[in-house]
Image (tube, grey):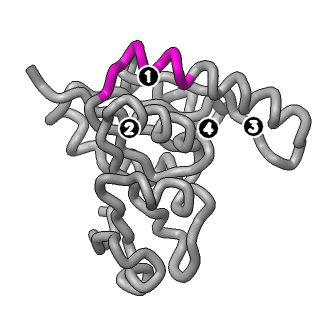
């Protein structure tokens, strides 16, 4: 039986980075979770039932965001117990935070890949997950001064 691995990220650039890991998907019993928006609805045609969506919210509309984030947290619990991943791999951001925290509490290994777009400062999700990640990967060597326990993995873009 193959290990269950959950790949999770927000939409946009974080999702683009996560999808660069596609060669790993077939090595595991994988599942992908991201935010639902028009830009990535077509992914359902590619990944079928291996892809799930969480609500998309932007902090620009704070009240709406808070409601959607609450719903996201509730769905996170549902998906965690549905998938039961042994490993959670994420490229961030806020969509992944609750899943990684819940996963860590329940015994999943956490692999966090700090975004390629960030070359010289910590991201909010990086700050949250750095202390609990079993493997914390940075894509820029300079980031090792900011995250000394991280591993430099180079760029994940092919």
Q: Nearer the viewer, residue 49 or 9?
A: 9
3D distance between C-alphas at marks 3 and 1: 20 Å
| Residue of label 1 | 80
Given contact means CB atoms under 8 Å apart, are the residues at marks 4 and 1 in contact? no
Q: Residue at 37% across / 25% down in the picture? A: 47
Please give the range of residues in magenta. Answer: 76-85
Quarter residue 51 falls in: top left
Real-space Cα separation, disc 4 to disc 3, in angstroms: 14 Å
Query: Residues at badges 4 and 3 in contact (C-beta under 8 Å)?
Result: no
Residue 76 to residue 144: above or below: above
The mark that comes first in sequence, 3 or 1, is 3
Q: CA distance from mark 4 to mark 1?
A: 25 Å
Give the residue at x 54% y 72%.
118
- Disc 2/disc 1 C-alpha distance (Å): 12 Å
Q: Height in image: 115 above or below 25?
A: below
**Dot label at residue 39:** 4
Mark 2 or 3 closer to N-term? 2
Q: Quadrant of the C terminus?
A: bottom left
Q: Report the disc number at residue 68.
A: none
Nearer the N terminus, badge 2 or badge 4?
2
Image vertical order of residue 62 relative to residue 5, above or below = below
Q: Which residue in the protein does label 2 denote?
A: 7
Left/right of residue 38 with respect to residue 52 in the rendered view = right
């Amino acid at each position: 039986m193959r290990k269950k691995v959950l790949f999770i990220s927000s939409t946009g650039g974080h999702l683009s980075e996560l999808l660069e890991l596609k060669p790993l998907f077939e090595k595991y019993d994988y599942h992908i979770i991201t935010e639902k928006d028009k830009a990535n609805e077509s992914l359902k045609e590619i990944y079928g039932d291996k892809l799930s969506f969480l609500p998309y919210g932007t902090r620009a509309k704070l009240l709406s965001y808070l409601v959607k984030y609450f719903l996201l947290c509730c769905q996170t619990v549902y998906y965690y117990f549905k998938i039961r991943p042994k490993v959670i791999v994420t490229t961030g951001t806020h969509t992944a935070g609750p899943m990684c925290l819940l996963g860590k509490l329940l015994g999943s290994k956490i692999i966090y890949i700090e975004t390629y777009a960030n070359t010289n400062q910590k991201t909010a999700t990086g700050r949250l997950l750095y202390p609990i990640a079993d493997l914390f990967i940075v894509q820029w060597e300079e980031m090792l001064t900011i995250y000394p326990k991280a591993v430099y993995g180079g760029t994940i873009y092919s």
